[in-house]
Amino acid sequence: MQTRNLGELAEYVGGRICGDANVVIKSASTLGRAHEGDISFLVNRKYEKQLRTTQASAVIVGREVTNTSIPLLVADDPYYAFMQIMVLLHGHRKHKKVGISSRTSISDSAKIGVDCHIHDFVTIADEAKIGDGCVVYPGVYVGEGVQVGNDSIIYPNVTIYNGCKLGNRVIINANSTIGEDGFGYASYKGVHHKIPQIGGVIIEDDVEIGACCGVERGTLGDTVIGQGSKLGDLVTIGHGAKIGAHCLLVAQVGIAGSTTLGHHCVVGGQVGIVGHINIGNNVTIAAQAGVINNIPDGQVVLGAPAIEANQGKRAYSMIQYLPEIRQNIRSLQNQIEQIASPSEPDSEEPAEQ
């Protein structure tokens, strides 16, 4: 951990200071948890009132705030500036330099790049290639013909099936599986017959895959995770799916086979997406949505089935009133029936004398 004053941090992120530039910053925290020596950030306006109570020594903001005496670092993008400062002060996880453990099983035909660190009980199969500067943690299996690019990190107990290709600076977190057989079966007379999955998996540069994910190999073509995309924990990518560049898939997303996502899509937690559809670029899908149709570029959708967000908000806001509306409709139906039906006389008129 490094220590900097606020002026140095502002210069580092290209921001400007409102207040004392000599304040010493040792760490980073949220507004509610910060203490002296911490720097925090304000992005969501609903937390602005915490500026009056926070113990932080400085706060990163997107504009000047007048109702606080705390030194401010004004930046174009406060959250991005916060990330830069976090990296400067704390750095990323450090990996122990172990070289190549004697307790690995590495095929004679496998190729390991320079400055790699291969931990205990790793298995690397025939013709596999590991690029320079890679870290492979205990219990990893790298299958036959797998290619891993430079500076990649594979955490414990990851399995990479044969023929998969990983780009540079790929991170795969613990217990994930890459290149398993796709969920493909031909049902005939009540029996499900397995279809060979002869495609592969391509994971492009700078992708990070969370823990316990499954990325299926394609039936015929490849399953592709585009450059810079990030997958949360417990995400499943079906066979032959194509995920565009710089997408964010939050935890527990499931994408069925042969579906295509464009670039810069954001998919909320527990979203389910059917197979064989196309989702455009810059699409946002709210958490727990169920997507069953194509989505054009730039749209925001929510709900199950997923519909355009503004329409969905109006529709779902009515749910709480449905019992009352139902009762009102029944009352109106009864009134209409009474009007439409001829009146029955209460009793017979006495006969004229």
Image (tube, grey):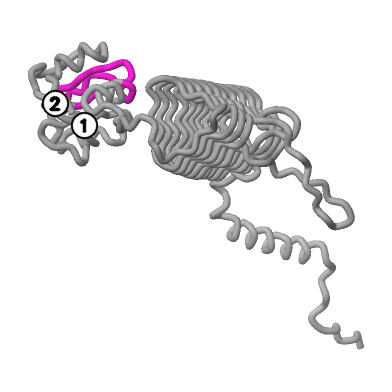
Question: As rendered, which of 112 and 137 lies closer to the eye?
Answer: 112
Three-letter code, disc 2: Ile
Read off the magenta span: 59-80
> Does residue 311 sit above or below 325 in this rendering?
above
Residue 250 appears in the rendering: no
- Identify the residue shown where x is 73% and y is 33%: 198
Q: Secondary structure at mark 1?
A: strand
Three-letter code, disc 1: Ala
- Viewed as shown, does residue 278 lie left or right of 178? right
- Viewed as shown, does residue 105 lie left or right of 52? right
In x, y percent, where is residue 90?
23, 28
Question: As rendered, which of 72 and 90 lies closer to the eye?
Answer: 90
Within 10 Å of disc 1 (Cα), the crowding (few <14, some 14-19, many 20+) is many
> Does residue 10 sit above or below 116 in this rendering?
above
Magenta-drawn stretch contains 42: no
Magenta-drawn stretch contains 71: yes
Determine whether label 1 and label 2 are within 8 Å by CB. Answer: yes
- Identify the residue shown where x is 58% and y is 59%: 324
Mark seen at residue 28: 1
- Viewed as shown, does residue 102 lie left or right of 7? right
Name the residue tied to disc 2. Answer: 25
Q: Where's the C terminus, which quadrant?
A: bottom right
Measure how far apart labels 1 and 2 are at the Cα level.
8 Å
